[in-house]
Amino acid sequence: DPKIIQKPKYLVAVTGSEKILICEQYLGHNAMYWYRQSAKKPLEFMFSYSYQKLMDNQTASSRFQPQSSKKNHLDLQITALKPDDSATYFCASSQGGAAETLYFGSGTRLTVL
Amino acid sequence: QQQVRQSPQSLTVWEGETAILNCSYENSAFDYFPWYQQFPGEGPALLISILSVSDKKEDGRFTIFFNKREKKLSLHIADSQPGDSATYFCAAQGYGSSGNKLIFGIGTLLSVKP
C-alpha cells in the first residue's frame, strides 16, 4: 500500500484557474515537503513543513500556498495558474532531521493549457 | 546557477557492465549526498547515500566514490541489470540545513540493454 498518497495523479487546468493538490502521508513522519519536477530541470525544492509549521519556502511566487490541516496532510494550493506551472509536483516526508531519507509520493502531473 | 551537476545526461550500457554516473557540486557546506532512483510514473526513492566524512560507500552492486577535495562523487552500478534502467539523481544537503532541503541534480537516464 502506498504510504504517501497524492491526488489526483493527473490534472488539467486552464490558465488563470485555481487548483489544489492533495497529499497525505501514513509514515508517522513529522516533516513534509513539496518538490516540483519540470522537463529538463532538476527536481526543485518548494516548501518544507515540520509539525505543521512552515520551515522553509523557496518558491518566489505567492500563488503557491501550502495548507496543513493535520500533521499528516500537506496540500498545495496554486492560484492564477500559468502554462509555466505545468510540471509534476511531488510530496515527500521524513522524520525531520538532517541526513534522513526523504520518502516521495508518486506525484501529481499538472498540465496548464 | 546549478549547485549540483550530473553527467552524462543519458547513459546506455550492456547487461553485466558497470555503469558510472558522475556528480559534482559547488557548495563546500554540503555534507550529505544521497542518490535517488526514479522509474517512470513513480516518485524518486533513496538508493544509497554517503556522508562527507567517508570516501566510499557500498551497498550490494551500488558503490559511491566521494572526493571531497575535488567536490566530486560517482555512483558505480556493477553487473548492471535491465531492471536498473531508470533515472538516477544525485542530491546534496548542507550541514545544519533546516529539515531536509535537498538540492538535486538534473539526473542521468540509465538504459541497460540485455
Image: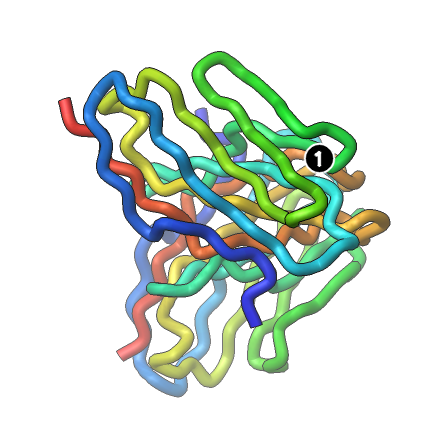
| Mark 1 secondary-structure assignment | loop
- What is the number of callouts on the image? 1
| Quarter of the image with the C terminus of chain A in it | bottom left
Q: Is residue B55 left or right of residue B98?
A: left
Please say if B104 is above or below B61: below
Q: Is residue A28 left or right of residue B38?
A: right
Q: Which residue is nearer to you in this view: B39 or A86?
A: B39
- Would you identify the image quadrant in which residue A77 lies? bottom right
Residue at image coords 32%, 62%: A11
Place of residue A100 in the rendered image (x, y in percent of width and height, measured from the top left): 71, 35
Please say if A78 is above or below B49: below
Place of residue A9 in the rendered image (x, y in percent of width and height, measured from the top left): 35, 50
Q: Is residue A50 left or right of residue B83?
A: right
- Name the chain letter of the residue that bears numbered label 1: A
Residue on which disc 1 sits: A100
| Quarter of the image with the N terminus of chain A in it | top left
Residue at image coords 40%, 54%: A108
- How crowded is the residue under tag 1: few (<14 C-alpha within 10 Å), some, or many (20+)? some
Q: Which residue is nearer to you in this view: B68 or A19?
A: B68
Q: Which residue is nearer to you in this view: A84 or B36?
A: B36
Dot 1 amino acid type: Glu
Residue B12 in view (yes/no): yes
- Would you identify the image quadrant in which residue B41 lies? top left
Q: Which residue is nearer to you in this view: A29 or A72?
A: A29
